[in-house]
Image (cartoon, grey):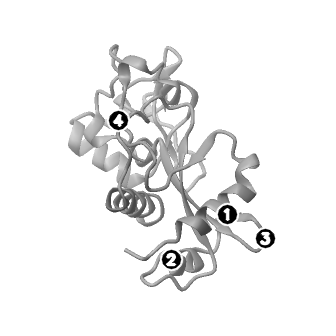
Amino acid sequence: MPPFEAALMQRTWDAIAPRYRAYALALPGSARFSCQAELCDAHCCRAFSVNLGESEVARMERESGLRPVMFLECEDGAPIVLPLAQPYLLAQGDNRCRLLGDDLSCRQYHGRPNACRLYPHFVVFIDAAANRPVTADLDGIARSFADPPAGPYVPLLLRHVECPGFTGPPMDTAEWETLLRDTYQLQYQSA
């Protein structure tokens, strides 16, 4: 795990935070996430459309035992395919994800899509000189996350502020580094 300077991350976040009002910076010492279904209105499972790629559909089918027509948006009995890199949409019904149980837990938690695995965290890379997020320079992003960091960008681990699950004890540095690494890998290196 590359060494990351918390002070640099905080300064970078302070410069861009007004554009990311729905998020907060997560650093060592931030509260751990623990799903609090009883406190949650499942906002994320109602408000967001979740795109899936081929590998996610295959994983969900394999791990859930469900056929794709049971968890994807369909038309005329076949999954809708959009002209996107992740061409499928997780099915919605009654204004919520079709996989959301009555107890507000995911009925297919182990096979859930990457977007659901990421939530409520994600990593953004910021060009600190321009105070702008970077998405297209995948080589620079990878170099910025290498050990030692050799790229031009500052990685920031963000968390969604509306999620009520940030109630756990503070993360120590090792836990935070693991969360940052795992989130980065899922977000940037998943097939």
For the residue marked with disc 3, what is the amino acid?
Answer: Ala
x then y, percent, for residue 41: 48, 19
- In which quadrant of the rendered image does the N terminus lie? bottom left
Which residue, given by chain and number where applicable, does mark 3 sit on? 130
Q: Residues within 10 Å of mark 1 (few under 14, many from 20)?
A: many
Q: Is residue 29 left or right of residue 34?
A: right
- Depth check, front residue: 47 or 38: 38
Which residue, given by chain and number where applicable, does mark 1 sit on? 12
Nearer to us: label 2 or label 4: 4
- Depth check, front residue: 77 or 104: 104
For the residue marked with disc 1, what is the amino acid?
Answer: Thr
Q: Is residue 191 visible to the viewer in this orientation of the structure? A: no
Q: Which mark is residue 103?
A: none
Q: Do the CB atoms of the residues marked 2 and 4 lie less than 8 Å apart?
A: no
| Distance CA(mark 2)–CA(mark 1) | 19 Å
For the residue marked with disc 2, what is the amino acid?
Answer: Ala
